């Protein structure tokens, strides 16, 4: 199952539309959390907002997460061994106030934590070889030991 | 046992905050965030407060949030205040300093190219000002590791 999530702060039609268009040609089960977008998906199940329980249920069931480059989703996905594809929100499309999600995506892609998507062809490239995708990096339950030690000693 | 307030807005900031809580296991931990529904709290959490959600676009909410956070910190008189942002952490740091707490700002790992706006403001007030990216270390802003 693929779980698509755009977070709680703003809609992200570009992402939902990209996946919905792809889903038209696929029989992979998808579920999208859309956050009041204008674009209504035609090929995938969707809901604007999810309760924490609903979110967890979809998240746990999914093998693949496609999302905006929000740190919440990125950290949860890496912690739970999910395959993660992220499309950064861009200021030019009024998807965020600035382009920090683009920088986050680039940084995490460079460290090989995630599969970055910058446009439709990136998405298709990855989704067309689904079976080869894997969770690129699994992280532990807490911050790294150096940071924890520093905080403890303050 | 020291009293610690750990505070952040909901979403990614909260998920980062939860990842540093093992460092506070032996303290009396008070959590503060902006959820409308009470979140799932870690076992070592002694008390939880909810405050107004706000962003830089809504000044009235920001003022209300600042007031609520200030009152909590003033009343609880913690020994330490720790935040992973965003705006909600600034008030906690300022009032934390006033009451003599040690104050720690950890800028979100999402800020790879530059510090967040809140982080830049918090830099004036926090005792310890941390970035999660080594290349952003500058002056008072130090790198001591990351939440992942």
Image: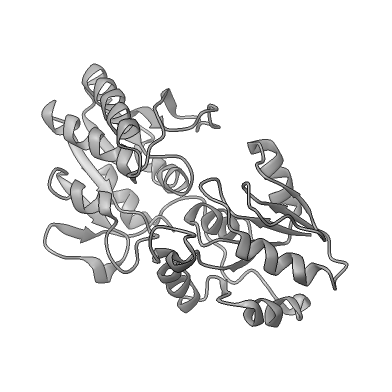
User: Toward the viewer: B22 or B95?
Assistant: B95
Q: Position of residue A3 (x, y in %)?
A: 71, 57
Query: Left or right: where does residue B95 sit relative to residue A59?
Result: left
Q: Is residue A132 above or below residue B118?
A: below
**To which quarter of the image does residue A53 belong?**
top right
Query: Left or right: where does residue A149 sit relative to residue A54?
Result: left
Q: Position of residue A152 (x, y in %)?
A: 28, 43
**To which quarter of the image does residue A24 belong?**
bottom right
**To which quarter of the image does residue A21 belong?**
bottom right
Residue lying farthest to the top in this orientation: B75
Give the image's coloring scheme.
one colour
Q: Is residue B34 above or below residue B17?
A: above
Query: Left or right: where does residue A71 sit relative to residue B26?
Result: right
Q: Position of residue B123 (x, y in %)?
A: 17, 50
Q: Position of residue A62 (x, y in %)?
A: 74, 56
User: Toward the viewer: A2 or A45?
Assistant: A45
Query: What's the residue at 60%, 58% (across, down)?
Result: A77
**Can residue A82 be seen here?**
no
Residue lying farthest to the front in this orientation: A38
Query: What's the residue at 29%, 39% (across, down)?
Result: B89
Q: How many marks?
A: 0
Query: What's the residue at 80%, 58% (across, down)?
Result: A44
**Can residue A111 be seen here?**
yes
Q: Is residue A75 above or below residue A22?
A: above
**What is the quadrant of the N terminus of chain A in the image?**
bottom right
**What is the quadrant of the C terminus of chain A in the image?**
top left
Q: Is residue A3 above or below residue B24?
A: below
User: Toward the viewer: A49 or B71?
Assistant: A49
């Amino acid at each position: 199952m693929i779980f698509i999530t755009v977070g709680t702060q703003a809609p992200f039609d570009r992402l939902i539309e990209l996946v919905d268009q792809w889903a038209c040609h696929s029989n992979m089960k998808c579920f999208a959390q859309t956050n009041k977008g204008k674009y209504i998906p035609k090929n995938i199940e969707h809901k604007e907002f999810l309760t924490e329980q609903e979110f967890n249920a979809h998240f746990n069931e999914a093998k693949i997460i496609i999302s905006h480059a929000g740190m919440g989703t990125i950290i949860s996905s890496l912690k739970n061994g999910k395959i993660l594809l992220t499309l950064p929100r861009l200021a030019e499309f009024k998807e965020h106030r600035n382009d920090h999600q683009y920088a986050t995506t680039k940084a995490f892609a460079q460290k090989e934590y995630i599969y970055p998507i910058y446009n439709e062809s990136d998405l298709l490239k990855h989704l067309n070889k689904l079976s080869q995708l894997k969770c690129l990096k699994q992280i532990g339950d807490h911050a790294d030991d150096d940071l924890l030690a520093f905080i403890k000693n303050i | 046992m020291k009293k610690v307030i750990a505070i952040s807005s909901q979403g990614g900031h909260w998920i980062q905050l939860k990842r540093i809580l093992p460092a506070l296991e032996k303290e009396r931990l008070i959590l503060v965030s902006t959820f409308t529904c009470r979140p799932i709290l870690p076992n070592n959490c002694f008390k939880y407060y909810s405050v107004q959600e706000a962003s830089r676009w809504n000044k009235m909410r920001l003022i209300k949030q600042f007031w609520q956070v200030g009152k909590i910190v003033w009343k609880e008189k913690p020994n330490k205040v720790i935040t992973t942002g965003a705006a909600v952490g600034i008030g906690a740091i300022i009032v934390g300093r006033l009451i003599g707490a040690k104050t720690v700002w950890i800028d979100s790992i999402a800020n790879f190219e530059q510090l967040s706006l809140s982080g830049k403001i918090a830099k004036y007030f926090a005792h310890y000002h941390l970035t999660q990216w080594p290349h952003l270390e500058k002056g008072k802003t130090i790198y001591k590791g990351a939440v992942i």
